[in-house]
Image (spheres, grey):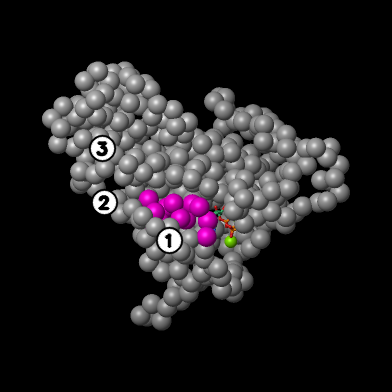
Amino acid sequence: MRLTRYFLPVLKENPAEAQIVSHRLMLRAGMIKQSAAGIYSWLPLGYKVLRRIEQIVHEEQIRAGHIPMLMPTLQPADLWRESGRYDDYGQEMLRITDRQDRDMLYGPTNEEMITDIFRAHVGSYKDLPLTLYHIQWKFRDEMRPRFGVMRGREFLMKDGYNFDVDKDAALHAYNRHLVSYLRTYERMGLQAIPMRADSGPIGGDDTHEFLVLAETGESEVFYDSQITDLKFGDREIDYDSVDQCRAVLEEFTSRYARTDETHDGALFNAIPEERRRTARGIEVGQIFYFGTKYSEAMGATVQTAEGSKVPVHMGSHGIGVSRLVGAIIEASHDDKGIIWPEGVTPFHCGIVNLKQGDAAADAACEGLYKALTAAGLEPLYDDRDERAGAKFATMDLIGLPWRITVGPRGLAAGVVELTSRRTGESEELTPEAAIARIT
Ligand code: ATP
Ligand code: MG
Ligand code: MG
Ligand code: MG
């Protein structure tokens, strides 16, 4: 992409309404524009990051054997009357009436709708296990929408639902989700710690939230510092293996890590004092096992191998796709701007032409642009007729992992400058060597 042809409305001033760094940087980098409280347009740069996060979520869900689909944003109230949640859900639910006077709602989550789909089409244990998921916009009329996309009212969520014949099988699905989530967050450059949580309005016994540690997080968390040494890394996992998935769950949940909702002072104080940590965290996902809560209420049953009919065992599993954009920035920025992890960056590298209009500099930039594109990377070429300082400031703000700076002086010596956004270190290299370094 050439910057002169792109739409990147960066702001020079810090927007007064932004209280936390990710919100400020997303507005300044021209990633989002607020349309109403907690409702945002995703401008091209923000949209690219959102799509990359979504792509990672899809890849990891599919790898775990979960099946993508798409349910609507609007739901009939009657489904929620069946589960009893139409009245229970309260003011976060946006209720809508259509022209026929039918009660509708903008889905805050999809347990009822997926259970309705399941009961219409599945009746035998032979069709299990089954996990269906979608990535769809949700609406929750939050009391205090704030922090930009971190607590929006309209937000993008991956929500998945497992259907299993009994509790053991459903707990395997739970463990499989935990593993897939660890992989997902690590690919985004994040450490998200599974913490024992409270089940809230979804209901259920087993649940973990995934929290990214950050000062601006809305949750208070308590943990054993040893947990931050754990990495899933690039280990191979067989998602069908009950033992392998359980072992990962045990490894990642055996140390104390809880949110304030489930915090237990006595257990916490049993940890050696030097390992006790109290911090703040951003909830970027949650997994639940809730058994037959919805299947019993809505009559979703399956026939077992022995011929009896039992309510199907279920769980639901969410990832805050749009919240993650803010969470990644909270975890990765400096005073000049965003520092995108390679896995989610909107463009792989920036090309800065120090002297637009200089024949040699223009030709070298065009050459780099073509070669990077041919290598499968997406460069953002700053071809504006602007001062070098302004071009550097824009690149630092939008946080691409690499910048290649091209100017007549370097070219006379046969080199360009390659700069890492994360370390700030620069190297002088031939254009070919610079390309080789980042591909
Ligand atoms: P929170 O405690 O932050 O209100 P939640 O526990 O109500 O979140 P879940 O029902 O667990 O949310 O939804 C799954 C995920 O969706 C959350 O882990 C979070 O990452 C994301 N999410 C929830 N509410 C919002 C929101 N208002 N804006 C953006 N993302 C959200
Ligand atoms: Mg909530
Ligand atoms: Mg929560
Ligand atoms: Mg939650």
Image-quadrant location for residue 365: top left
Pick out the residue farthest to the front: 409
Label 2 to label 1: alpha-carbon separation: 19 Å
**Amino acid residing under circle 1:** Pro
Q: Which residue is mark 2?
A: 7
Ranked by sequence position, the earlier of labels 2 and 3 is: 2
Q: Quadrant of ligand 2?
A: bottom right
Which range is magenta? 19-32
Magenta stretch: residue 5 in it? no
> Where in the figure is residue 66, as x and y percent of width and height?
49, 41
Q: Please, is residue 166 above or below residue 144 in the view?
A: above
Q: Residues within 10 Å of mark 2 (few under 14, many from 20)?
A: few
Q: Residues within 10 Å of mark 3 (few under 14, many from 20)?
A: many
Q: Residue drawn 51% across and 69% down?
A: 141
Q: Is residue 301 left or right of residue 1?
A: right
Quarter in which the N terminus is drawn: top left
Between marks 2 and 3, how big is the CA–CA gap?
A: 13 Å
Name the residue that disc number 3 marks: 381
Location of residue 53 by image quarter: top left
Q: Earlier in the sequence, mark 1 or mark 3?
A: 1
- In the displayed structure image, the side of residue 313 where residue 131 appears, left or right: left
For the C terminus, the image quarter is top left
Q: Work out whether 258 lies above or below 237.
A: below
- Residue 370 is marked as none
Residue assigned mark 1: 15
Q: Is residue 25 magenta?
A: yes
